[in-house]
Image (tube, helix red, strand yellow):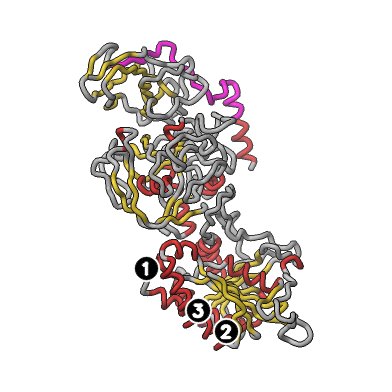
Amino acid sequence: MNITRIALLLVIVLILPAPVHAQGKAAHKDAYLYFVWPQDGTVIKGAFWARFGLRNMGVTHAGDDFDNAGHHHLLIDVNAPLDPSEPIPQDKSHLHFGAGQTEARIELPPGKHTLQLVLGDAKHYPFKPPVVSKKITVTVK
Amino acid sequence: MPGEIHHIRQGRDGSYPIDGSPRRLAAILAADISGYSRLMSIDEEGTHARVKRHRRELIEPTIIEHHGRLVKSTGDGFLAMFDSPVEAVRCAIVIQQSMVGRNAALAREQWIQYRIGVNLGDVIVEPDDIYGDGVNIAARLEGIANPGDLYISGGVYEQVKHKLVCGYQSLGDRQVKNITDPVRVYRVLPDPAAVVKARPMPGLAFAVIMSVSLIASAAAATATWYFFVWQPKHLAAERLPAQTPVATKNPVTAATPQPAPAVNPAPQPSLTIAPPQAAVTPPVQPPASQAISEPEMVTLPAGTFAMGSNDDPTEKPIHQVKIKPFAIGKFPITVREWNQCVAAKECTNKVTGKDDAPVTNVSWNDTKQFTEWLSRVTQKQYRLPSEAEWEYAARGGTQTKYWWGDQPAVGMANCKGCNEPYDATQPMTVGSVKPNPFGLYDMGGGVAQWVADCWHKTYQSAPIDGSAWLDGECSARVIRSGSWKNDMNYVRSANRDNYDANVRYPTHGFRVARSP
């Protein structure tokens, strides 16, 4: 019992000086998230491989709580602003790559679509400040 | 409990069958068929005919043979009284053993199994019925018995222990509903083979049965073994939940052992063999919690349905799927249910949330730990439902977009835009909104739910026998139902999505399934 208490106290003491987690870990100041492919304005025929680029931070599994590392999320045709205090949503327009994937096979109906990457932390929260790519527009024929 | 005694005179001239006091001491036998409504849902006419035949060929003659009287029979059970507790227990054993023989040739889902309770008590006898605590306790004993089992009260045990050579497993004192004092309960093991089967060391078991006096250590071993291995199974007495629109937020907690009265030392479960005076069982330290709260299940009949829709490319093509009967959780697994697995150190994911909230932030791999643990402690094969089973259950016999029709409706599901007020931060506790026609809650909205299948982006070449689709790329598994954070479109019965099997996400939960 005593050991547990001491351990608990130690944990509390260790955690307290740091900002209480929950909402977003600190991003690296030079983090840069981008699409290797496609690029803004690309015209694509059929399904394609989207490739994700990240500089000055690392890609890891969701759940791994290392500093300076996160996992990719691909936002398709999302217009709503990103809420930094909530986990990145999980639905058909917010694709998660929690296994540490850096590319994905994407199939979209013909027409114009926007794509944007958001880096999420171990608990799927955006970093502070959010690490996001430029929102690009592609045309699927 | 005077409230339980009905002083209703039965027609006629109100006379009692016995001169003087209508009260008398009697051994009461209460029996019912386990899973009767499930049997009726599978085969109503066949079940009814079989039950009637059993009553005519087996139950009525056996009661008469043992000098008893059939007081009344209900659709799924009967009540009998005997002058002698020995005869009552003998009668019960004959019925249970004959039923084993009758079921042997049948498929398991067609088995008719009685649960029987026998109690000795003072009862009020009227021409058509009997009343009193003595009857109520018999009925409660029957209620906590497992299918095919016979439970007797301490009073009956005292009378029969020297006269009937069979095993008696003490289950300790049980608090029964509406009865003030706890009732000592014994499970009768009429067949020595059952005792052998129930023990890890057959040789020792046999010796135990044969020996007149039990060696203390053997008794301890037996007790411990029963306690750890058999007890959870017994305590988790399954109930077929009624398909009622009233939400039961608490899953059935079957026969939770009650604290013993302060004056008595805690009763220890033990196996005693007649003559039982030799069965001095040394105290066994009980584990902190031996009873687990098992998820409430609803058994669904076999059927064929059109799976999929044309609303999304992933839901095509619509295809006919044949489903075998199976049971599925009435609610998603709750935080309380999950935490039992954490407490048992079998689930590694320590979750947060209110007890009655659906468990969230569990990965597909996490759910495997849970179903494996639950199967082990209940001795039942719990698993995730297949994607086909999930959609069959979600549709509840409908072919519309939602189980209630084609139009979005307010108050039918827990999702963004489904209800007011809307709390985006957490799911509603399970069972907060209406159940579907199968009596299942939160099949659409609430928490997204893992199913067994590996992800395939369409139903092209999907299985049509209701089994899980397990070939191909299995790093991503299917999630169904949508969550409280998704909009109405995700509540549709056919909606499907996928997620990495080893990744946790705060809106993902699950419900369990098993064969009936």
Q: Position of residue B108 (x, y in %)?
A: 39, 67
Q: Is residue B476 above or below residue B2?
A: above
**Looking at the picture, which amino acid does disc 2 mark?**
Leu
Residue B90: give x, y in percent of width and height. 55, 83
- Secondary structure of the residue carrying tag 3 is helix
Find the magenta span and give its range. A11-36
From the image, state whether disc 2 or disc 1 is nearer to you: 1
State the image coordinates of residue A8 (x, y, percent, origin top left). 60, 34
- Quadrant location, the N terminus of chain B: bottom right
Q: Is residue B220 visible?
A: yes
Marks 3/1 same chain: yes
Q: Left of B423 or right of it: where is B477? A: left
Q: CA distance from mark 3 to mark 1?
A: 21 Å
Find disc 2 in the rendering and name its residue: B164
Hey, which quadrant is residue A70 in on the image? top left
Task: Tell me the chain of label 1.
Answer: B
Dot 3 or dot 1, earlier in sequence: 3
Per the image, the residue denoted by label 3 is B55
Mark sitting earlier along the chain (3/2): 3
User: Against B186, is B445 above or below?
Assistant: above
Q: Secondary structure at mark 2?
A: loop
**Horizontal relation, residue B4 to residue B103: left or right:** right
Instruction: Please tell me whether residue B484 is drawn above or below residue B219 in the rendered image.
Output: above
Q: Amino acid at mark 1?
A: Ala
In this figure, which residue is indicated by the disc labeled 1?
B107
